[in-house]
Amino acid sequence: MPADVGTKVITGHFGDEEQKKIAVYEQRGGYRNLKKALRMQPAVIKSEVKASNLRGRGGAGFPTGVKWGFLPKDAHEVYLVCNADESEPGTCKDRELIYWDPHQLIEGMVISAFAIGATGNNYIYIRGEMMREYQVLIAALDEARAKGYLGKNILGSGFDCDIHVHRGAGAYICGEETALLNSLEGKRGQPRLKPPFPAIVGVFGKPTIVNNVESLSNIPAIIDKGGEWFAGLGVGRSGGTRIVCVSGHVEKPGIYELPMTLTMRQIIDDVCGGVWKGRKVKAVIPGGTSMPPLAEDELDVVCEFDALMTSERIRPVEYLAGKKFDMGGGRELRTMAGSGGIVVMDDQTDIVRACWRIMHFYYHESCGQCTPCREGTGWLQAVCKKILDGEGKMADVDLLGTIAEGIAGNSICALGEAAAWPMMGFLTKFRNEFYERCVDYDPAVAPPPLAPLPGPEADDEGEDEAGGEGAAA
């Protein structure tokens, strides 16, 4: 039976060029929820967002309402920053949200700014290469100011809010929220030591909330229909829908807004028409290339944050029938939903080559601030290339695992893990393909077993992965 692709909360107007115009947006109910929000108490808005179970859509998956709650109660100057520095390989949803429905993002930002007390100037940090989206966004902001949705005393409410766009220069690391804030201030885009976290000391030294484009775009719908409604669209601790960007070896790659009750296998087979050329799946990266891959026998898991980290299977049939199931326990998949970049690799994929390309990317994008990441990513790509070129030895495969373990948990930001986690995942699930490329490989001799390597842990502080929301929660 084909999968039910469910409700479209924020992508319903994709493909409609008229949606960019403020007059059309208003005719379709746009800015109605801003008017509603301005009549609400900020605490009520925050309560609705918390009840919605909206989790950060850029990588970390941290609850948005909880993150807002980290702001000091006595803060007199607060900033809201939208992370549009989408740079995680395999991820391309935020640019489309900006291009097709820019006023939805603007409305979500103004509502959020009102809720957290971010009076005055707030910012959208957009990846510099997104010139098409930048131009659409600037035009939409001008329209919003002209209609009184931005600026002083918005709609007579007494609330002041303006939004300014800051263009980045194409650095993956600036998707990490503290590197983004440094860049926004005109400094070198390098991550900051934490604590203090941005909610305490953010841009210009003031309390700051950094949220992703997709996260903020969902806010108007939550105000419209309530947090309980939004939570009901999701599953477990995750409310709403997910936008996934499916690329690689499928018949119909694309950007899809889907319910989180769909399994990875259903997304590939039912939504994307299956693997191309009649081939089979070998591996799937579930959330951008910084996430460990899933093997073919792990695809019957729903595309929900907790499920991809901890559970073996969550069957949508049981969910839809109202049966209770455990989000945790079972087989630990040790990966993450990340930024929604699903990359499908067919059974003819050269895993060693794919892994080397990923390692080379993170080596190139490391800011060089901390030694484990700066040196470790260089070694990972170099040893991978040695094996790829047929010059490696079996001991080099074990060396890759040692290097990855040395990076994970030892860098200032998550870019180190962005390289270490996929390396660990590929080694754990496809190590024989690495051994077979080594000059001293003997098929008659069983290779030594490789102990399961550690993978991602849930982020309890609401931090972001480098580049995924770039990766803001």
Image (spheres, helix red, strand yellow):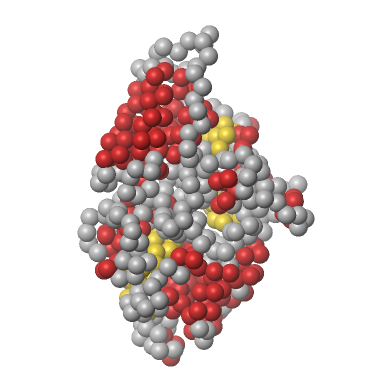
Q: Residue at image x 33%, y 36%? A: 377
Residue toward you, 279 or 211 = 211
Q: Residue furthest bottom?
A: 156
Give the side of residue 268 with respect to residue 286, left or right.
right
Q: Work out whether 352 lies above or below 441.
A: below
Q: Where's residue 429, x and y in %?
A: 53, 30
Screen quadrant of the C terminus? bottom left
Nearer to us in this view, 8 or 140: 8
Task: Check the image and name the residue furthest to the top.
Answer: 444
Q: Residue at x 38, y 48 (%)?
A: 414
Q: Relative to 189, is 340 on the left or the right?
A: right
- Taking the image as shown, residue 405 lies to the left or right of residue 328, namely left
Q: Residue furthest left?
A: 187
Judge by depth and name the residue closer to the eye, 200 or 392: 200
Q: Residue at horizontal 76%, vertical 54%?
A: 323
Q: Where does the image place residue 324, in percent across and percent down from the top left?
A: 73, 54
Vertical order, 13 against 254 (above or below): below
Whether residue 93 is situated above or below residue 371 in the rendered picture: below
